[in-house]
Image: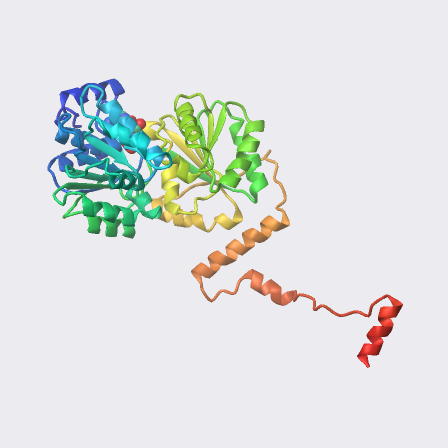
Amino acid sequence: MITFEELKVNKSILKALDELGFEIPTPIQEKAIPVIRSGVDVLGIAQTGTGKTAAYLLPLFMKLVKAEGVDPRAVILVPTRELSIQVGDDIADLTRYSNIRHAAVYGGIGWTKHAALLEPGIDILVATPGRLMDLYRANVLSLKKIKTLVIDEADRMLDMGFMPQIRQLLEIIPVKRQNLLFSATFSEKVEEMAHEFLDFPERVEATPSATPAELINQCYYKVPNFATKLNLIKHLLQDEEKFTRVIIFVKTKENAEAVFKIVKRRTEGEKRIMHSNKGQNTRINAINAFKDGEVRILITTDLSARGIDVNMVSHVINFDIPPNHEDYVHRIGRTARANNVGEAITLVDPSEEYHVPKIEQLIRMEIPLKELPEDLEIVATKQEESQTQLREIDRQKRLEDPTFQGAFHEKKKFFPKKKEVKRPPQDQRKLKKYRGGKK
Ligand code: AMP
């Protein structure tokens, strides 16, 4: 086993690592640090939770050595505000005994505040693509000194449609630079992106692509409908001893609110909710309170959860299957961090069962099915919900077989809509007119 000293990490950073309790490098750090230090472009495949942030930050600190000049020499592009703040915090933690300066910027608030952060001079800029361009266009940021470009969570960047902005940026930063691209998953699109942005990259991987941490115990329940899912959540959360720090992922903000309503009333402990309609401060406060252990249950949508970096998450509950299968990997990666054991539980209604084998294929593991608890109250599925489920199942069948007509289609044939029959009016005067008009 190699040590941070052997990886030639600077003394000041070693001191910070020691204080942070990072005793030995994680596998991705052990693999990536020497390769990045050699100066080549790197494609890193590593989920959050593997220590991938420090895997690119440590060699970056070694390259920058110390504070120098005014303009940043490295840019770290991230897809979301939360991740920008998180990476900024990680830099602050790791450089507490070094004079390397940084700023973390993101959209959603006025750029003048961020411009002020750059003024005293910085070495590393962490930014979402849009905000970086805002600052550049406002002439408060020079990119002439950039020697390293890191693109973090590249798969998420692609999902969020940031490619045009990244291309724009590449036109204005110096050509002679080192590029590091990190992604939680390795898809065809990520491969194309790597091809476009990296020069003869060396690939380093934490685990085979998209394999979730082995420490996560995964399982799923087949649940007939939304109301029964709510009952199951209540049921599971009764176990306060096991479910100590829980993240519940919900696909949409509307459903997240509905889950929050029940959880708020019917479970013990402090709870918070995060989604894109919540103010940025509310989201940051929720993450911090969850981190500090003040909050037992955090309910969130996929996007808002990016960048949550909390150890000791006991359970991740997927209230539904994420529409994007790779999000499953992101979601469950929130538990079992830094060698802790964690559980990931997924609730699957009939219209979601289609996705289970697809996810299993992606993670190259079988997710065990669990029986519903005997004392769980199972609610009958409302007609509207049942129809929505059937429609979705039809859609999935058509995806697999474009010639499939669909159960709905069949039904329509069996029960044709009644033709409107014009009946004679009841009113005598109108009846006369009706008969008269018929002649
Ligand atoms: P990341 O994959 O970058 O999101 O990091 C996941 C978590 O692991 C963070 O809480 C880090 O602070 C922590 N971490 C990173 N490197 C190490 C290490 N070598 N030893 C222990 N914890 C670490």
Residue 18 figure quarter = top left
Q: Nearer the viewer, residue 83 or 232?
A: 83
Q: How is the image coloured?
A: rainbow
Mark count:
0
Asked if residue 234 lies left or right of residue 145, the reply is right
Residue 82 image position (x, y, % from top left) = 35, 33
Q: Nearer the viewer, residue 231 or 163?
A: 163
- In what quadrant of the picture does the N terminus appear? top left
Residue 34 image position (x, y, % from top left) = 14, 34
Residue 10 image position (x, y, % from top left) = 14, 24
Res 373 seen here = no
The correct choice, above or below, for 389 with respect to 342 in the image is below
The correct choice, above or below, for 192 with respect to 241 in the image is below
Q: Nearer the viewer, residue 51 or 215?
A: 51
Asked if residue 99 lies left or right of residue 346, the reply is left
Q: Quadrant of ligand 1?
A: top left
Residue 117 figure quarter = top left
